[in-house]
Image (cartoon, grey):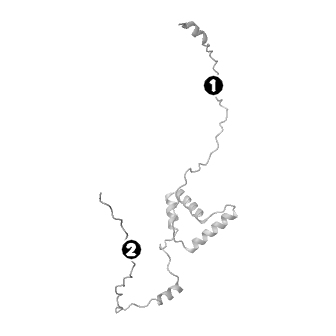
Amino acid sequence: MVTKSKPAVAAKRKAVVAKPVRPVPTPSKRAKVVAAPIRVETPKKREKLVRDGFTIPKGEYAALADLKQRAAKLGQAAKKSELLRAGIKLLTELADTRFVSALLAVPTIKTGRPRVSEPLAATAAAAPKPVSKTTPKPGPTKKVATRKPAPRKVAARKKT
């Protein structure tokens, strides 16, 4: 059996030559630092939307329509919900004292659905009949005859 000698293995290896290291350039005092452009982060996941209803006075509702027209004239179309959300953002940025004064400037209104308008209310008030105490109570209702389903045929099992 022939074995290779150690000098032969060492001869096959190539000598590694060290490369000269370049010095890292240091910024001079006069070098200007260029700032990276600021990116607006877009949300990766959409936030869950909530649908809600509310009561608003006619004057404030008309103000929403005026603000929509104003935005359109400025070249930025806006929906009512976008205007309300923009107002909420502005309110969140206010200091506490300004926030409280803005709340005090808005009159409180009754919550819930508005009443039926007066002309309809007058006719609706006349429509129901007065209920007297002698009105007989409704008796038990008759049962409606229902057809029973036919019995199922069961095959007889054999005894084993």
The reply to whether callout 2 and callout 1 are in contact (CB within 8 Å) is no
Nearer mark to the viewer, of 2 and 1: 2
Element carrying mark 2: loop
The residue that disc 1 covers is 24
Mark number, residue 150: 2
Which numbered tag is attached to residue 65?
A: none
Q: Is residue 29 above or below residue 63?
A: above
Q: Position of residue 155 (x, y in %)?
A: 36, 65
Q: Nearer the viewer, residue 142 or 42?
A: 142
* 45 or 112: nearer the viewer: 45
Q: Dot 1, crowdedness within 10 Å: few (<14), some or many (≥20)?
A: few
Question: Which quadrant holds residue 89?
Answer: bottom right
Tally of marks:
2
Nearer the observer, 16 or 103: 16
Dot 1 amino acid type: Val
Which residue is depicted at the point 58% across and 73% down? 59
Placement of 37 over or under 131, stated as above or below: above
> Disc 2 to disc 1, how far (Cα)?
97 Å
